[in-house]
């Protein structure tokens, strides 16, 4: 089995305890030589300053290739691009450009009157600056705001044509979900790399609620498996086994890179990576 290249997503810390947790996560996962790590925004841009601080700190002190999330929510065009420029000034030139989620309780996304109307406009503005590597999100299952799956594919193609070089998918629970999506992208003429987003299941009940909100299909067999595992206190063992199996299947289908949503809880991600052959003694060669 080919050893994959990996990348990791972190949350910006919102208090001192979370800061220690983030640093512990970095210490556990950075020896795995990630291709890059990304730092998220909170819903509605609520962690904008925290994200900027975390990005700068990780770049300067951890020696990691950091990609900063940047969204269109609750900011003017000038404010958003000023944040992008501040990333560049700190030496961070990789951005994950997203529309962003609306603030909690506000319903559907509504653009700022003087802001970017959607992610394509943001990507175009970043591309004009000619100093960023731009990644975007992709949805192997229908985005809650999309008319259908075909609309998702069309919009992904627009984002890539606007200047993005790679897409990272929302998480999913079955290998076939990604493979069917990849086939639809290829049929639509999309040639840019599409990296599967992998979410090791730390807490099934919490993850189930999260998945329902994101529109991710929850297979009945997965519910049953975690119910049985809970009775035997083997949830972590099941989560590691299932995630490793899915990643192995993806690699056997030609996938070369995996992006892990760590939730700043690195143990399961580390264990899965080790099972895939990504260890501190391995230095990955397939760097995009």
Image (tube, helix red, strand yellow):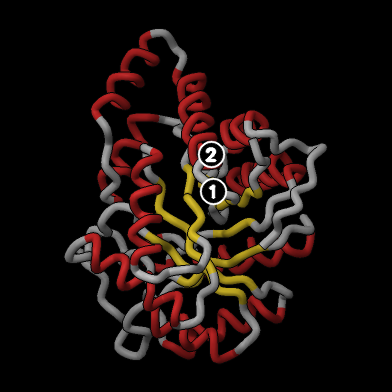
Q: Quadrant of the C terminus?
A: bottom right
SS for callout 2: helix
Q: Say which residue appears at 53% left-offset and 39% top-offset.
A: 252
**Quarter holding residue 169:** bottom left
Q: Which percent across, then down, holds residue 136? A: 47, 67
Q: Say which residue appears at 34% left-offset and 45% top-offset.
A: 177
Above/below status of 40 relative to 247: below
Q: Say which residue appears at 41% left-offset and 76% top-offset.
A: 159
Q: Say which residue appears at 50% left-offset and 43% top-offset.
A: 253
Q: Quadrant of the N terminus?
A: top right
Above/below status of 96 relative to 178: below
Q: Which percent across, then down, holds residue 262? A: 54, 43
Furthest residue toward left: 147
- Residue 14 or residue 6, whichever sits in front: 6
Furthest residue toward top: 232
How far apart marks 2 and 1 lie (CA) works out to: 7 Å
Asked whether the viewer can see residue 106, the reply is no
Asked whether the viewer can see residue 206, the reply is yes
- Residue 17 or residue 205, whichever sits in front: 205
Above/below status of 283 relative to 150: above
Residue topped by disc 2: 252
- Residue 124 or residue 88, whichever sits in front: 124
Residue topped by disc 1: 255
Say whether residue 45 is left or right of residue 10.
left
SS for callout 1: loop
- Residue 186 or residue 42, whichever sits in front: 186
């Amino acid at each position: 089995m080919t050893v994959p290249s990996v990348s990791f997503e972190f949350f910006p810390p919102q208090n001192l305890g979370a800061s220690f947790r983030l640093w512990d996560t970095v210490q556990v996962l950075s020896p795995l030589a990630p291709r890059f790590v990304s730092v998220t925004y909170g819903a509605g841009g609520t962690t904008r300053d925290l994200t900027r601080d975390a990005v700068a700190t990780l770049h300067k002190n951890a020696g990691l290739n950091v990609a900063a999330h940047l969204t269109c929510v609750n900011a003017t065009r000038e404010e958003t691009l000023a944040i992008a420029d501040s990333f560049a000034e700190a030496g961070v030139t990789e951005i994950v450009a997203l529309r962003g989620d609306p603030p909690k309780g506000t319903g559907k996304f509504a653009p700022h009157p003087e802001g970017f109307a959607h992610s394509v406009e943001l990507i175009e503005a970043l591309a004009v600056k000619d100093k960023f590597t731009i990644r975007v999100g992709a949805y192997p299952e229908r985005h809650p705001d999309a008319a259908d799956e075909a609309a998702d594919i069309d919009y992904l193609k627009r984002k890539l044509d606007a200047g993005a070089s790679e897409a990272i998918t929302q998480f999913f629970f079955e290998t076939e979900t990604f493979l069917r999506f990849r086939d639809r992208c290829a049929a639509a003429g999309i040639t840019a790399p599409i990296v599967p987003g992998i979410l090791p299941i730390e807490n099934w009940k919490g993850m189930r609620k999260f998945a329902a909100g994101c529109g991710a299909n929850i297979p009945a067999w997965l519910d049953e498996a975690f119910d049985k595992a809970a009775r035997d206190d083997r949830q972590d063992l099941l989560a590691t086994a299932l995630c490793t199996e899915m990643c192995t299947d993806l690699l056997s289908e030609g996938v070369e890179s995996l992006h892990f949503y760590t939730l700043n809880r690195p143990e399961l991600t580390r264990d899965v990576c080790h099972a895939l052959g990504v260890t501190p003694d391995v230095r990955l060669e397939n760097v995009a």
